[in-house]
Amino acid sequence: MRENSGRVLIVTDVQRDFCEGGALAVPRGEEVVRPINRLAQNYDLVVLTQDWHPANHQSFASQHPGRQPFEEMDFPYGLQTLWPDHCVQGSPGADFHPDLSVPHAALIIRKGFRAAVDSYSAFAEADGSVTGLGAYLRDRDVRHVDCVGLATDFCVAWSAEDAARQGFRVRVFQDACRAIDLNGSLEAAWARLSARGVALTQVG
Ligand SMILES: [Zn+2]
């Protein structure tokens, strides 16, 4: 019997394309796998997220002639960073890292599966549509949300912020995350998280 009832571990986007050799590799992204495997053993409830885009996803710079990856572009729901093509549905790059071992995970939330809308957070898409994860967790009397995965300053931070906004008590395990750090995005993410009362901790 694991301890941690009332607590969920959200494992964000530990997928091949975000690790070494992937289409949108996060520096040292693969280093999160081992601490996450160890940490997840302590949780009854683990939720995985999986970035999961159609090949014509509008967050891909390739869909916008003349645009380059990592530029920002105005979308109907706000500013959108353009990315290299990544995590295309059914492609090897969209698979979880082969060494990720969380067999008891209860739920996989797929993100960004609508061509026109990106989704960093496990709780809501970029246009505000909810995924249902908040209700799922409340139905299971979860009050504490712990976050790990890739990338710290995008998907992990957005999920942590949304969880805090929904009234969960939130922690981010820094040593089980890695960042993209685009134009100061990591520092900005830490500032937003600390303003929301999100605690930073370590797997150790
Ligand atoms: Zn994506």
Image (cartoon, rainbow, N blue to C red):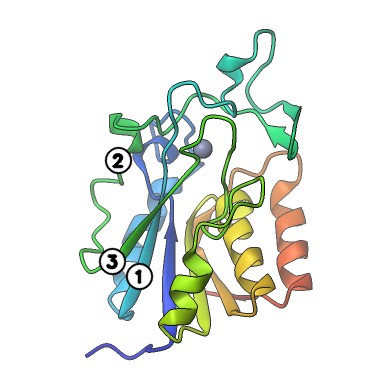
Q: Which mark is residue 105?
A: 3
Q: Considering only order in the chain, which callout, 1 or 3, is on the residue closer to the N terminus? A: 1
Measured as percent of width and height from the top left, residue 88 is found at: 39, 29
Q: CA distance from mark 3 to mark 2?
A: 15 Å
Mark 2 or mark 1, earlier in chain: 1
**Residue nearer the viewer, 65 or 27:** 65
In this figure, which residue is indicated by the disc labeled 2? 95
Residue 113 in sight here: yes
Front-lying residue, 20 or 198: 198
Split into 4 quadrants, where in the image is the C terminus?
A: bottom left
Q: Residue shown at 65%/8% (left/top)? A: 65
Asked if residue 17 is positioned above or below residue 198 in the image, the reply reads above
Residue 188 position, x and y percent, is 77, 54
Q: Which mark is residue 108?
A: none
Image point 70% across, 35% down: which residue? Answer: 80
Circle 3 residues within 10 Å: few <14, some 14–19, many ≥20 = some
How far apart are labels 3 and 1 at the CA level? 5 Å
Determine contact: label 3, label 2, CB under 8 Å: no
Please tell me in which quadrant of the rendered image residue 37 appears: bottom left
Q: Is residue 75 left or right of residue 175?
A: right
Q: Is residue 27 left or right of residue 107?
A: right
The reply to whether discs 3 and 1 touch (Cβ–Cβ < 8 Å) is yes
The kind of residue tagged 2 is Asp
> In the rendered view, does 86 fall on the left or right side of 90?
right
Q: Where does the image place residue 146, in percent across and percent down from the top left?
A: 49, 74
Q: Amino acid at mark 3?
A: Ala
Query: What number is the disc on residue 46?
Result: 1
